[in-house]
Amino acid sequence: MFFLNLTAGEFLTLLSALSGLIAALYLLDRTRRKKLVSTLRFWTPALAADQQRSRKRMREPWSLVLQLLSLLLLLLAIAQLQLGNRNLRGRDHVLLLDTSAWSGESTRDATVLDREKRIAQQYLAGLPLRDRVMVVRVDALATPATSFTSDRTRLSNALNEATPGFSALNIEQALSLARQAQSWSGGRPGEVVYIGPGFIQDDAAPETLPNLRTVLVPTDPENCGIRAIGVKRGDEDPNSWQATVTLKNYGFQPHTVTLKTQFAGTRFAPRVFLLKPGQETGAEYNFVTNTAGQLVAAIEPADALAADDRAALELPRNGSLRVAAYTNRPEVLRPLLEANHRLSVKFFTSAQYVAKPAADVMLLDQFAPPAPPEIASLWIEPPKTGAPLPVKSVEKDALIKTWNSDTALATGLHAKEAPLPVAEVFQTFEKDIPVGSVSEGPVVVARPSSRSGPKMAVIGFDPLNGQLRFEVTTPLLFANLLHWLSPEAFRALDVTAGRPGAATVSLDASERVDRIHITYGDGSPVPFTVRNRSLQLFASRPGIVRVFSDERERVLSLTLPDLAERKWNPPANSASGLPPSARFTASSTDIWQFLAVLAGAILLVEWTVFGHRRRHSPSFQNRAPQQAAAAPQLVSR
């Protein structure tokens, strides 16, 4: 017999204090009574005699005994008196169910995860009903599926809802969570039970728990699969692609596999590989296409783990920038615009102008259109009366003094004192970006998109006239402005099929860290860090992750399983396998409900017997009822 909520000292202290208070109130209530008298003549002698009789004996002592007994029972209920041995009371267990990538492997009768669920149900069936269990699904993250509960239906539902994941097991994090959960539960710690195949990714030594139990589920490690697919655009032709499919043998025996690859329905020749134990090899493909499509790679024969036998990537259309050039001198602009293989340029006369052509960017050369553009636009020396920005002045023989190096628009532009035969100086407003300026003001201005219109860049001089035609500044200025107007077309695109969890991406020397942002396919952000030009991110769930920078876009299709390759060796002092049923003896009995009901019943009996008597039995009866009726009644205490 022991207390669950209070110690013996706390119980006795509360019992003594409350018993003394009840006894004091009981005696005080019975020494001061209401009395009805007809006259004050005999008041003093009668009162003295009554007090003397009260001191000689206690009225209704059984009422006090019943009240103290009910108080004792209520305190025992609050303290949760337990019948039995303290060591046999209910405990709090943590059940770690492995949902890593290996749990999806198929066996002859079921998957590894299905076998884990059956073992977990057997473990729950052997526990005393008073024991509480927390179910935690563990892979790269430890995710609690329930709180500590003794509801076996709720625990069974949590087990049945578990599905195989894509990431490798982080056993260190799982054991740490289990230890913290037991320390915060407030109950008596039970076992930490791990059920799974026991493959872990890293070599970190997990903490040792004295109450650890492991139930390892055997698997077939003879698995070959696709580890990754990497695709990037060619450097010379925007329609060319370079793909690499990486295969790996995770088993201990050599295996021969056939790799079949296709893009948008076009099949490549199958390739056969003999993979030695633990070997990783890559197959390279080069193909040309100007359409979007799906690149699919699959290996045969199929094995027990089908999740890594096939992988697919969605490739976008070619990355050329469509430019509609409205000019009356196409022979002058053609060498500049067609030199860049990322530009797809169509020339039109000014009379053929439309506000929204089938292009990404329009170029307006030395004319003002009748209607403002509805797409991004680049203006070259617009007329003063129809310029998109107010022209403050027109300067002759001006010199470019500064380039705005704080923006990417002026990247590589260092030439100063460049002569301009004629230059328009623009008036700028809030959010306008001056790119190049003369002494009188800006002559190259960029305006971001807003409610009033799309992006726009204006050059207040003719860069193809005079000495500027032979300067390196001219093609760089055009490239920077077009890149700013439509950055998507100029980004180098890398598409990769990989595994969820931790991922590392190498950055180019030209990529600025402050201009990198990473999102899932639905737009939600992905946290990341950068160290030594290496970007590190963690994707907690399978999906498409996009890494954006000024010069490059990387698409990570994290849908392949991350198969751990190292077998976990549990500590030597940990238990293994399911415990024998004889180990689960009867636990202590909780009787607080019975004590609370008994205390309430005693209070009801005390009130029924003695409360009724106190209300209808006066302590002093009037011996002269006629006189009392004729005289005024005095009430005193």
Image (cartoon, grey):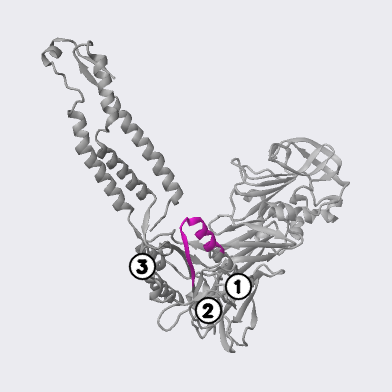
Q: Is residue 450 visible?
A: yes
Mark nearest the camera among 3 and 1 is: 3
Q: On residue 586, which mark appears?
A: 3
Q: Nearer the viewer, mark 2 or mark 1?
A: 1
From the top left corner, tell me how far across and down residue 458 is, in percent: 72, 45
Instruction: Give the vertical position of 51 relative to 201 (above or below).
Output: above
Q: Nearer the viewer, mark 2 or mark 3?
A: 3
Mark 1 Cα shell of 10 Å, populated few (<14), some (14-19), many (≥20) = some
Range drawn in magenta: 176-194
Is residue 603 positioned above or below 188 on the image?
A: above
Q: Quadrant location of residue 288?
A: bottom right
Q: Position of residue 384 (x, y in %)?
A: 73, 38
Q: Amino acid at mark 3?
A: Ala
Mark 2 lies on residue: 309
Relative to 256, does residue 471 appear above or below in the rendering?
above
Residue 267: where, in percent of width, then height? 55, 80
The C terminus is located in which quarter? top left
Instruction: Give the labeled residue for mark 1.
Output: 201
**Which one is in front, 102 or 284?**
102
Mark earlier in primary sequence (2, 1): 1
